[in-house]
């Protein structure tokens, strides 16, 4: 729980997108207060001050820091974590070489890097995700979205847009995160035309807290934003209140929602205790 793990993804042209994480508990008298990384010359490549405040990247049993390793950085990297009770812990990654060619990186037809998903924990019948896979979105308040909720349509009450619900109401798939919380995947199956397209997904919990917002650009046409498929992911923290409500905004047909009143946000398995 103290030694920070390391994950590197090569960047086209050189350098790396990097992530380190610890799986420590989070108590006022015992928590991870800092992450940092040094290169082979002892230079500090990155440092991150961590507090007791919960954020999507700094939670109980999951403290994650994301950063860049620039091209030309000398290996090996050493990752450090400081615990206010148990001191400083480190690991030197002698087997990780910081060199790669552009051929090491795969891209789709739109120039987006293709990355591999992590294996899920071996819990029969449960599609678990690892804590550091949690997506992060900029904070948005309910007040920021007030204009989009003047009129909200649902499958039960489509108003003037009868027959349009199936294209607008976002579907929801939930994946439990080891240690608690969820990754929520939303999808709408709307067409994509400059005059009629889905421009936004978001989720609110039972207390009206906005858990994240994803904006879709009509100019983008990739795997997660194309005709008949608009997909997004959100982090649902352990303290999220039931029920969740998923939203989609169409520039022509307005805001559509569904409240998942029968969906429980509790889950437990042996994996949760790790």
Image (spheres, rainbow, N blue to C red):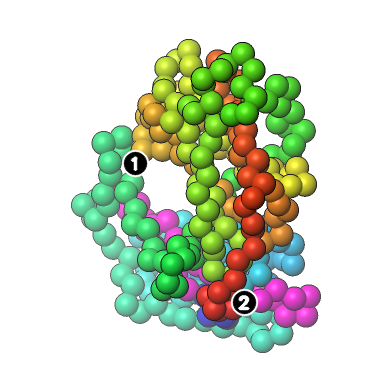
Q: Quadrant of the C terminus?
A: bottom right
Category of crowding for the residue at label 2, using alpha-carbon neighbours closer than 10 angstroms: few (below 14), some (14–19), many (at least 20): many
**Quarter occupied by residue 143:** top right
Residue of label 2: 24
Is residue 130 within the magenta segment?
no
Is residue 9 within the magenta segment?
yes
In the visual, does 201 lie left or right of 29? left
Pinpoint residue 222: horizontal percent, then vertical percent.
36, 34
The answer to whether any part of residue 47 appears in the image is no
In the visual, does 163 lie left or right of 75? right
Residue at horizontal 33%, vertical 57%?
A: 116
Q: Quadrant of the N terminus?
A: bottom right
Pinpoint residue 177: horizontal percent, then vertical percent.
54, 63
**Quarter occupied by residue 96:** bottom left
Residue at horizontal 31%, vertical 70%?
A: 97
In this view, the residue in front, 175 or 57, is 175
Residue at horizontal 64%, vertical 58%?
A: 265
Residue stretch in magenta: 5-32
Element marked by disc 1: loop
Category of crowding for the residue at label 1, using alpha-carbon neighbours closer than 10 angstroms: few (below 14), some (14–19), many (at least 20): few
Element marked by disc 2: loop
Dot placed on the residue nearer the N-terminal end, 2 or 1: 2
Residue of label 1: 112
Pinpoint residue 171: horizontal percent, then vertical percent.
51, 40
């Amino acid at each position: 729980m103290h030694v920070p793990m390391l994950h590197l993804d090569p960047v086209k042209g050189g350098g790396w997108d990097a992530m380190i994480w610890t799986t420590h508990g989070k108590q006022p008298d015992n928590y991870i207060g800092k992450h940092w990384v040094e290169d082979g010359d002892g230079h500090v490549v990155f440092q991150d001050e961590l507090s007791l405040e919960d954020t999507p990247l700094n939670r109980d049993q999951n403290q994650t820091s994301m950063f860049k390793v620039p091209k030309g950085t000398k290996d090996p990297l050493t990752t450090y974590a400081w615990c206010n009770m148990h001191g400083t812990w480190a690991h030197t990654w002698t087997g990780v070489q910081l060199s790669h060619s552009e051929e090491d990186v795969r891209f789709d037809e739109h120039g987006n890097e293709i990355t591999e998903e992590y294996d899920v924990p071996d819990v029969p019948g449960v599609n678990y995700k690892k804590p550091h896979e949690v997506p992060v979105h900029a904070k948005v308040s309910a007040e920021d979205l007030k204009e989009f909720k003047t009129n909200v349509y649902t499958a039960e009450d489509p108003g003037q847009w009868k027959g349009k619900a199936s294209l607008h109401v976002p579907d929801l798939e939930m994946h439990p995160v080891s240690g608690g919380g969820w990754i929520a995947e939303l999808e709408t199956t709307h067409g994509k035309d400059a005059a009629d397209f889905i421009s936004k997904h978001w989720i609110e919990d039972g207390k009206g807290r906005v858990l994240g917002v994803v904006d879709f650009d009509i100019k983008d046409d990739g795997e997660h934003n194309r005709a008949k498929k608009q997909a997004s992911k959100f982090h649902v923290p352990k303290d999220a209140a039931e029920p969740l409500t998923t939203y989609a905004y169409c520039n022509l047909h307005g805001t559509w929602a569904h409240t998942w009143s029968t969906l429980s946000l509790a889950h437990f398995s042996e994996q949760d205790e790790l």
